[in-house]
Image: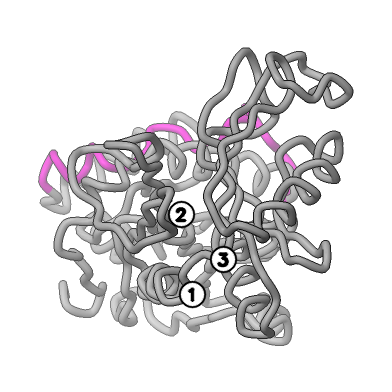
């Protein structure tokens, strides 16, 4: 894991509360100008000064911790401006902007535990941050929640990115390792015994492909990206048509434009409906013409993460459409 995630911040708050420490949840609710973090970013602060999360990469965190601890005395929520327009003249953001931070002391551990349980079940979770405390919330409507509503701030937590990687060789191992370092859940399907052995040792969820015509069970959901890094296209003949039928926000397969054209023609000849064929990305990655495995993995993962952050989370959280490759055979 290369950085703290929103779920990590909630787990920190829950753990400190379980230890008996006063804990404060701090949420970025508005931005004036520019800001290193987006609306909805959070910190969790314990009364002994420990904290998880950040808003500026070190510029105002000490002041935020001090302000947070100060709210424990009366236990009331507090909205404070930092940066431009703030009464704290000696605290400035390097970007010159201003941010509003909502401090919620002693958040309800049951509400946080419920949100984390939903998150772990790969459901979108939500909290309502109000003057009278932190409460569980429901996700409705067409968009992810991150804003003020009727005097309280509502915030949703999307399920973790899941990446299903299919392929062989260094392209596969590089992609799996990079995705795991980013914080994604990773499943690997491959006939490459050497690659699987390396990834098994590192604790990856791996499935050995033993036949081009027998597809193993694979569970996906709307927060899953499926990507093929096979150079041997024979392995895709059964895998790609099945993958296109599964819930996912991204299905891609590496290759030149000529390879992509041949691949789409093969899918059409195999009887894959047009609406499913259109799910397949016409190009994979944000860096054109990559030639080495590490750059290819970075390029592909960057595109996947970009699409993941564009997800209509609330729309995806209708009754979970979860299926497996096995169920579609």
> Between residues 272 and 99, which one lies in front from this camera angle?
99
Residue sitting at x 76%, y 35%: 56
Q: Which residue is mark 2?
A: 227
Of the residues under marks 2 and 1, which one precedes in the sequence? 1
Q: Residues within 10 Å of mark 2 (few under 14, many from 20)?
A: many
The vertical placement of 263 against 95, above or below, is: below
Is 15 on the left-hand or right-hand side of 243? right
Q: Which residue is mark 3?
A: 106
Of the residues under marks 2 and 3, which one precedes in the sequence? 3
The vertical placement of 68 against 288, above or below, is: below
The kind of secondary structure element at disc 2 is strand
Is 45 on the left-hand or right-hand side of 233? right
Q: Residue furthest front?
A: 74
Magenta-drawn stretch contains 283: yes
Q: Which residue is mark 1?
A: 109
Task: Determine which quarter of the picture holds residue 141.
Answer: top left
């Amino acid at each position: 894991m290369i950085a703290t995630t929103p779920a990590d911040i909630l787990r920190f708050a829950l753990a400190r509360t379980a230890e008996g420490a006063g804990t404060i949840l701090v949420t970025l609710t508005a931005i004036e100008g520019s800001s290193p973090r987006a609306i909805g970013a959070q910190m969790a602060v314990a009364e002994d000064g420990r904290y998880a999360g950040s808003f500026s990469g070190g510029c105002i965190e000490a002041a935020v911790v001090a302000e947070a601890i100060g709210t424990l005395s009366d236990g009331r929520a507090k909205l404070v401006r930092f940066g431009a327009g703030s009464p704290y003249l000696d605290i400035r953001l390097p970007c010159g902007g201003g941010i509003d931070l909502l401090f919620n002391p002693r958040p309800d551990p049951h509400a946080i535990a419920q949100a984390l349980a939903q998150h772990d079940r790969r459901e979108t979770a939500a909290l309502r941050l109000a003057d009278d405390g932190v409460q569980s919330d429901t996700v409705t409507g067409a968009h992810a929640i991150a804003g003020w509503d009727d005097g309280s701030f509502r915030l949703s937590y999307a399920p973790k990115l899941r990446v299903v990687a299919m392929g062989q060789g260094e392209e596969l191992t590089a992609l799996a390792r990079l995705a795991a370092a980013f914080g994604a859940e990773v499943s690997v399907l491959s006939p490459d015994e050497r690659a699987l052995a390396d990834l098994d040792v590192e604790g990856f969820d791996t499935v050995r492909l033993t036949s081009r015509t027998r597809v193993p069970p694979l569970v996906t959901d709307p927060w899953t990206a499926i990507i093929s890094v096979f150079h041997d296209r024979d392995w895709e003949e059964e895998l790609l048509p099945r993958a296109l039928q599964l819930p996912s926000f991204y299905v891609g397969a590496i290759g030149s434009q000529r390879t992509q054209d041949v691949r789409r023609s093969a899918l059409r000849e195999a009887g894959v409906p047009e609406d499913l064929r259109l799910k397949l990305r016409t190009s994979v990655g944000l860096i054109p013409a990559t030639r080495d495995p590490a750059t290819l993995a970075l390029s592909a993962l960057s595109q996947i993460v970009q699409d993941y952050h564009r997800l209509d989370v609330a729309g995806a959280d209708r009754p979970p459409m979860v299926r497996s490759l096995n169920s579609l055979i």
